[in-house]
Image (cartoon, helix red, strand yellow):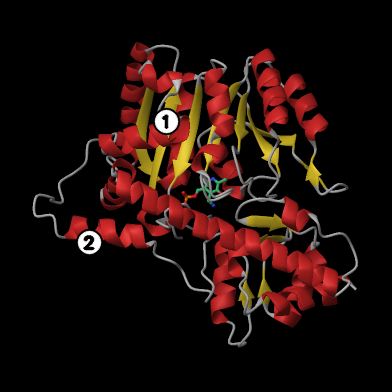
Amino acid sequence: QSVFHNVPLAPPDAILNLNTLSKADPYPTKINVGVGAYRDEDGKPWVLPVVKKAESVIVNDASLDHEYLPIDGLRKFTDASAKLILGKTSPAIVENRFAGIQTISGSGAVRLGADFLNRFRKATVYVSNPTWGNHHDIFRDAGLPVQTYPYWDPDVRGLAFQAMIDEIQEAPKGSIFVLHPCAHNPTGVDPTADQWRQIADAIRHGEHFPFFDCAYQGFASGDLDRDAAAVRYFVEQGFELLVAQSYSKNMGLYGERTGCLTVVTKTPELALNVRSQMCKLSRASISNPPAFGARIVSMVLNDEQLFTEWKGQLKVMADRIIHMREVLFETLTELKTPGTWNHIVDQIGMFTFTGLNAAQVKVLRDKHHIYMTDNGRISMAGLNSGNIRIFAEAVDDVVR
Ligand code: PMP
């Protein structure tokens, strides 16, 4: 008998499986709005020109080698990342009470934060309902109990704000709350500034610990500062917190696995202690992080000219997505598609939570060759002026 006889076949990852299905589909006007990866007007991945520039400098830099980075990564990268999310004048930066650890992109940052909390501040983790599916798996695999707090109200196709606040208030004291600072995945619905204030109050009152997962800074509104406002507000309010950052979307570095986990503490000494423990955890899982993506990001963040170019290119991506929202809304309105669709333009970031149900999603896939997750989430980046009408007409067909 095999050692592996009791290993069952795991189901394929829902989102990555959509990619496989879509790739295998020979239909000429198939549309993939499953995976959250930016596509340009021609439906192609976009290597940001500023990234190409940085790459060519790195490739031609004779002083660079392939030695290991330190366990906590490239310090120029982690410092610049902390400043990017917290703001250069953040009290945490000015008072040097932060530490940044380079991670395997946003996923690795969430996992390192989860491992750290499991070891030093174990508590129930509350994630939004719904959330990025991997949150459940990451926190569970790290050994933490996972619960959800209400987030999406299907009746208003918007934020279930009061229910969310109620849950924060009712959660056991000292729980961990995972928050999306901008471009909530999958709903595209973010709290307003005033709602963030109330969320912060409720979290403080419950002595809960905030863990921000920021995968879309600058990608949501096109403005890096605006998308970081929630995190900055919490820091100004004196919270200690964790924030996971990803450069997958905002720099298009998906496969380079470039991310950072930053902790904000009460004192510089505590930041050193936390850094040392995170190094131990990271050492035992990845030993030390990959260099190439961090070198690119570090160059872009630390060079004024390249930073300005990046902001322009970020805005190109954000604006194209915002424009696609408008066109989709207008086309559905023109087709007189039953239902209300204004949430398409009200939502923000990569995704629209369409409100389509699993049965409609299946018809879209089987009849129209349109691939989206069963919860009706679509990646706006998969749409362009060439396919948006086909998409809208298919939606019109399935809701009638
Ligand atoms: N958190 C959220 C909420 C996300 O949407 C994503 C990307 N899908 C990630 C984290 C992590 O992505 P990555 O590991 O590519 O940075």
With respect to residue 378, does 156 lie above or below?
above
Name the side, left or right, on which 230 lies relative to 352: left
Q: Amino acid at mark 1?
A: Thr
SS under mark 2: helix
* Residue 219 coordinates in the image, percent (x, y): 53, 51
Q: Quadrant of residue 390?
A: bottom right
At x 59%, y 75%, the residue is 21
Q: Quadrant of residue 196?
A: top right
Q: Amino acid at mark 2?
A: Ser
Would you name the residue on which mark 1 appears?
A: 262
Q: Earlier in the sequence, mark 2 or mark 1?
A: 2
Ligand 1 closer than 8 Å to the CB at disc 1? Answer: no
* Residue 289 coordinates in the image, percent (x, y): 30, 43
Name the side, left or right, on which 91 lies relative to 332: left
SS under mark 1: strand
Would you name the residue on which mark 2 appears?
A: 56
With respect to residue 22, does 174 lie above or below?
above
* Residue 249 coordinates in the image, percent (x, y): 48, 54
Crowdedness near tag 1: few (<14), some (14–19) or many (≥20) residues, C-alpha within 10 Å: many
At x 59%, y 31%, the residue is 230
Q: Quadrant of the C terminus?
A: bottom right
The foreground one among 326 and 195 is: 326
How many discs appear?
2
At x 59%, y 37%, the residue is 181
Q: Is residue 248 visible?
A: no
